[in-house]
Amino acid sequence: MAHRIVRLLLNLFFRLCIHLEVTGMENLPSSGGFIAAANHLGRLDVALVYHLLDRRDVYLMIAEKYQKYAIVRWLVNRMDAIWVDRFGADFRALREMLNRLQRGGILAIAPEGTRSQNGALIEGRPGVSYLAAKAGVPILPVAATGTQDALVKEQLSHFRKPHITVRIGQPFILPPLQGQDRDATLQGYTDEIMCRIAALLPPDYRGVYADHPRLRQLTEYHSSG
C-alpha cells in the first residue's frame, strides 16, 4: 500500500511540478535485476530514478541519519528500503541488497554516496561496483541535470517548473571479482561506472572524472558513432 502511495505522489509531482526531459528509456532492461546508478546533485535524484523505473521491485538504500525523522522512518520501512551506514563497511546492508539483486530486484543508487556541493561529479564509492560484480547484474548509467536543491527550491518558490533532463545510457556488466588485488579491481570498476555516467553529462558536470582516460575513450566512441 505504501509503495503505491509513494509512486502515485511521485508521478503527480513530476508531471505537475517538473518539466522533465528524458532520453534513453529504450535502454531500460525489460526484466531481471539491475543497478540504476545515477549522479547525485540533489534530493530529487534517486526519487527521479525511482519514478522512471515503473516496477514494484525497485529498492533504495537510505542513510541511517534519516531514521531520526518519524515520517521518513515510517515511509522507508513500508517501502522495504534498506538502511545503510554511509561511513562504514555496512556488510549487513550489502548482503541484503545482494540477495534482492540476485532475486531479480532493482537497486536505484548514487555511487557518490552524498550530494555534490558544486554540481560536478565527486569520487564514487566502491559499494555499487562490489554489488554489481558479486550479483552479476547489469549497471544502467543515469545522468541528471537541473536537480540541484537550491535551483529546484528557487524555481518552485516562484511557481516555475524546474527543467530537469535525464539521459539513460546503455547497460553494461562488470566481470566477476577475482581473488587478488580486489581493492584495485573495485577501484577500476568504480571508475568505469562513474565515467559511464560522466559521458552522459555536459562537460561542466563531469568533475573529478573530466580528464579520466576512460572518459576520453567513451566520448570519442560516442562522437565517432
Image: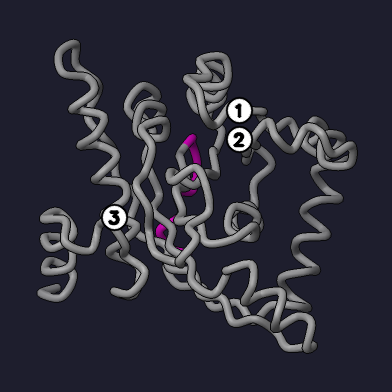
Q: Vertical placement of 21 versus 51: above or below?
A: below
Q: Is residue 50 left or right of residue 185?
A: right
Please, what is the dominant secondary structure of the magenta stretch? Answer: loop
Which colour assignment does the render follow? one colour
- Please name the amino acid that badge 2 sits on: Met
Q: Which residues are magenta?
A: 25-33
- Please name the amino acid that badge 1 sits on: Val
Image point (19%, 11%), residue name: 179
Crowd around label 1: few <14 · some 14–19 · many ≥20 (10 Å): some
Instruction: Work out whether residue 148 or residue 29 is closer to the camera in this orientation and state it.
Output: 148
Q: Is residue 80 magenta?
A: no
Q: Nearer the viewer, mark 3 or mark 1?
A: 1
Q: Which residue is mark 3?
A: 196
Instruction: Work out whether residue 74 or residue 175 is closer to the camera in this orientation and state it.
Output: 74
Q: Vertical placement of 68 versus 176: above or below?
A: below
Which numbered disc covers residue 84? 1
Q: Earlier in the sequence, mark 3 or mark 1?
A: 1
Labels 2 & 1 near each other (Cβ < 8 A):
yes
Where is the C terminus found, in terms of image quarters?
bottom left
Labels 3 & 1 near each other (Cβ < 8 A):
no
Percent position of residue 4, x then y: 82, 48
Q: Earlier in the sequence, mark 2 or mark 3?
A: 2
Residue sitting farthest toward the top: 179
Image point (67%, 28%), residue name: 83
Q: Secondary structure at mark 1?
A: strand
Q: Which residue is mark 2?
A: 61
CA gap, disc 3 and disc 1: 25 Å
Crowd around label 2: few <14 · some 14–19 · many ≥20 (10 Å): many
